[in-house]
Image: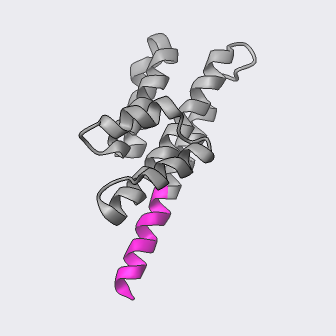
Amino acid sequence: FARYLELYDQTRDLLVKLFEIVQQLRVRLPNGEKKPEITGAKRSCVRYVVLAIYLFFFWMSSKTVTDKEFDQLIQTKLLRPHEMEWLKTYKGTAHSIVLDWSLQVLSGVLGTQRNKHLRAMNAIVA
């Protein structure tokens, strides 16, 4: 039972981190009405973070992501076919590189404010 409680606490903490990321994106990045590319970047960032969580749990259960699991992620639109093909050839853990993708998306739209905002996001994830 203690193991279950530990897993429950860790899973809850993971979801809290996700909520913090979404909140920080809403607070720190301007509304996309004036800059539509920012709205797209926010959505992509959150999609990648949620995708990374799914990939992490898939990986934890079998130390790999199966074709069936990849198909499930495609059906839910968390993963795009070209991303799936790339991830299948990647030698590292898929969830790690997908988290990196989320930061790369943000980096592309932040401009001169990049370092300040990325430090804040990294502090949440760490």
User: Which residue is at a point 55% across and 52% down the rendered structure image?
Assistant: 72
The reply, left or right, for residue 79 in relation to residue 40 is left
Q: Say which residue appears at 49% left-offset and 45% top-offset.
A: 51
Image quadrant assignment for residue 102: top left
Task: Using the image as rendered, state which of residue 83 and residue 47 is in the foreground.
Answer: 83
Q: Position of residue 110 (x, y in %)?
A: 50, 17
Q: How many marks?
A: 0
In the image, residue 113 lies at what x, y percent?
Answer: 47, 16
Direction from residue 88 to residue 42 in the image, left or right: right
Q: Is residue 2 magenta?
A: yes
Above or below, 102 relative to 69: above
The location of residue 89, given as percent across then percent down, is 30, 36
Please provide the residue range marked out in magenta.
Answer: 1-14
- Indicate yes or no whether the magenta region holds residue 70: no
Single out the residue that lies furthest toward the front.
67
Quadrant of the rendered image containing residue 61: bottom left
In this rendering, the answer to whether 19 lies above or below 103 is below
Which residue is painted at 38% across and 40% down in the image? Answer: 123
- Viewer-proximal residue among 61 and 1: 61
Most foreground residue, 91 or 38 = 91
The x, y position of residue 108, in whole percent, is: 47, 16
- From the image, which quarter does the N terminus lie in? bottom left
